[in-house]
Amino acid sequence: MVDLRLTDLSCTFAISAYFMRNSLTKYPEGSVRELWAVSLPLMISTLASLFMIFTDRVFLAHYSIDALNASVNAGTLAWALIAGVGMITAMSEVFVAQYNGAKLHHKLGTPVWQMIWFSLFSFVFFIPLAIWGAPAIFSGDRYADLEVPYFRLLMFFGPSYALMTAFAGFFIGTGKTKVMIWVAITANVINIALDRILIFGIPDLVPELGIKGAAIATCLGYLFEALVLGMLFLRRENRTVFGSMRWQLDSSEMKKCCKVGFPQGIFTFLEFFGFAVFYWMMTDLGEKHITISSICQSFTILLSFYYDGLSRGAAAVAGNMIGARKYDLVQKVVRSGFLLLLAFSLTTAFALVIDPIETVGFLFTENLDPALYQSLKICTIFVFVYLLFDGLRWVFSGLLVAAGDTVFLMIMGSLSVWLFLLAPVYFIVVQNHLPVEYAWGVIALYATLFCIVYWMRFRRGAWKKIDLIDQEPLHSSRDILAEPSAPIQLEKEE
């Protein structure tokens, strides 16, 4: 007589229910509600990540202005490098989404593990930067004694962020994004508590670490996220249904992941660096230029959580459709993304267009020079235009990433930053010492042209010809149960 264990029976029902689903959510495929359901947790997760950096700087501002300035200078370069590697490992979500859409559920764990291995291998990149790169880069700087230890700690912990994005790719690709909300919020609570303790110290218990304490707190927050997502990834259900224990190195799968991920990682770094060059140029032009640009940058950073979450949500939804060869539905995701983007833009119009000065009051405690107000009003209108078109560009970017069209994104993205942004700002604004309004007008034009380039690429449909996965779908739960990587044990009773 064969006795099926209750736990295995539950897994069987879970598998059957999963295979009966036609989309990531209970909503119609590609609809506004489906895209919103997948994107909202990602938006909150991104906002929580940005809030970690914001919290660090608030505590450091109360600790020392020198420490704050050093964290901005060293942190900009550090996060460009960390985000570049993290973007590579985040490409696990592309393959997870496509395998999920193609009903190749037993393969979902393989790309995740390749990016887990990649994140561990990245120690070879980060450790030399930490040991020798930090003093070489910041030697002679005004804040070098603070920048070097801050940058060094971020480099030592750099792989933890990459590990987190590798695990996150599994949950994004399968549409299980809600779990990332509470993980990110908990990580923020840990970061805030550690910031207070490690930066200022506790008499007779914890030494005062200052800027090093801020770096440790942030890195431990990301390490916590990576460990929790890793434990959830290795849960019994995921091992049984999705092959999350397929830990072996797979050279073919690793090559495919890197082929898609490296262009995105390189572009992410170059885009960070390009905007750093823009702010250096504004600094050279004078205090008014950099002050207004800093205020405008505050708006773009604050609101970028929405566009990042929407882009990653679109990539998850479209990736499943592409894996299932439902190309006609991808256009529906574009319409849904545009509607969600338009709704958000209308809510931000008051802060950026109608009455930006009141909004600035929430960001700055000191009164600004009245001479800046008129310029600021014009620049925030340009910020609104920039965010509208850049947000739409992010939607197209998510769809092209889902298809694996990342080489185009790297080439055109990198060229666009220099051709549409930096070159015009330098030759038109810097060379002629024009007001700051012209610089932000160029940024708005840059976003518009950049968006058109992505739209043209998407409309041409070349991304439909990219084949990232082998189409060998499993048609039933019986097939997946038969897979050696995901057995369900039966007990015989005599």
Image (cartoon, rainbow, N blue to C red):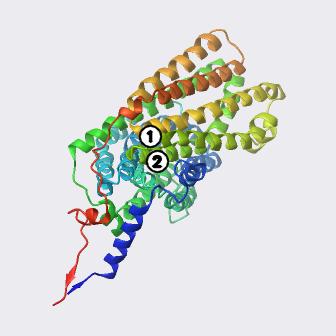
Q: Residue 176 vs residue 385: left or right?
A: left
What residue sits 68% from the left and 21% below the top?
A: 441
Kind of residue indicated by mark 2:
Ala
Q: Residue 117 location, x and y as percent?
A: 28, 49
> From the image, which quarter does the N terminus lie in?
bottom left
Residue 79 screen position, x and y as percent: 47, 39
Residue 394 visible? The answer is: yes
Quickly name the residue at label 2: 316
Q: Which residue is mark 1?
A: 327
| Image quadrant assignment for residue 383 | top right
- In the picture shown, does residue 213 fall above or below 84? below
Q: What x and y, as percent, mark residue 244?
A: 31, 59
Q: First in sequence: mark 2 or mark 1?
A: 2
Depicted 206 relative to depicted 68: above or below: below
* Residue furthest bottom in the image: 494
Between tags 2 and 1, which lies in front?
1
In front: 262, or 195?
262
On screen, residue 372 above or below 103: above
Mark 1: which amino acid?
Tyr
